Amino acid sequence: AGYRIVSTPSGVGMGSVKIRHGVVSVPAPATLEILRALGMPFRRGPVEGELATPTGVAILGAVVDGFVTRTPVLRVLRRGYGAGTRDYGTQPLGVFEVEIEGRYQHDQVVVLETNVDDVDGELLGRVREVLMRKGALDVYYYPAIAKKGRPGFMVQVLARPQDAWSLLEVLFTELGTLGVRVDLVDRVKLEREIREVIIRVDEVEERVRVKVAYDEEGRIVRVKPEHADLERIASRHGLPLRKVRELVLSRVMAELFL
């Protein structure tokens, strides 16, 4: 598996700093603009002074694959330290790098939840389409009992952190809800890859994408053909979807375990 570089939100410092144009608040305008343009999360503090410069945040934004506010359980294989020369009296500027072992993948997703009791099924169907089109990872509707015992639905949306605000707007404007619960949660995923297999149907070669998942020891734990590819082949050849799935899985097993 390849490496991912992740970072916690940067501590930018606080107070003020003198630049060529005069005294400005921390973070400096150029730093703040780069943070905004790259969608980088940050925190004020933890000490007085400028901890993040425009060059620094630009480099960080260019090299990281994502940001986390909480880290999973780690096992250190290598470590490295670096420190700047500025003395703040409390702590040095430092970097601690770890390499984690294992095939589990860790990231974070935002969970958006709201309850509605005054919308119909047609509207809920449209809202799901809009949410998925705007980047939602998944959308769920759960039957619920709302205020005053009215039947309704709990709407739950899984999203990447950078997509959360645009999806919130959809919930407010399309559903007319007055409030949305927002939670940032950790997610642990099996390592997976997409393979392409070729099967022959009526003497015609058909390509199917297949998702293969591995456990921490590298053993295959799940094989799942792409449903859209199965539907396409079934419709084209007039076959039951179940039959096409069996053909694909048979081919995949032969390739993986030869």
Image (cartoon, rainbow, N blue to C red):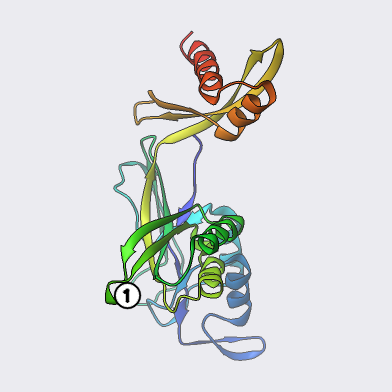
Quarter occupied by residue 69: bottom left
Query: Which residue is located at x 67 percent, y 21 percent?
Result: 237
Is 154 above or below relative to 214?
below
Disc 1 is placed on an element classified as loop
Left or right: residue 53 compared with residue 111? right
Residue 82 visible in image: no
Q: Residue at x 53, y 56 (%)?
A: 136
Q: Is residue 38 left or right of residue 183?
A: right
Q: Nearer the viewer, residue 145 or 165?
A: 145
Residue 113 visible from this viewpoint: yes
Residue at the farthest bottom position: 22
- In the rendered image, the residue lying farthest to the right is 204
Provide residue 53's location: percent of width, then percent of height: 56, 72
Percent across and percent down for residue 121 are: 49, 60
**Residue at the disc numbered 1:** 90
Residue 134 image-quadrant placement: bottom right
Amino acid under disc 1:
Thr
Tell me: residue 244, above or below residue 14: above
Circle count: 1
Observer-nearest of 1 and 98: 1
In the image, what residue occupies the spot 51% across and 83% down?
A: 26
Of all residues, the one furthest to the top in this rendering is: 258
Nearest to the observer: residue 174 or residue 29? 174
Q: Position of residue 250 (x, y in %)?
A: 50, 13
Q: Residues within 10 Å of mark 1 (few under 14, many from 20)?
A: few
Residue drawn at 66 percent across, 14 percent down: 201
Between 69 and 160, the one nearer to me in the picture: 160
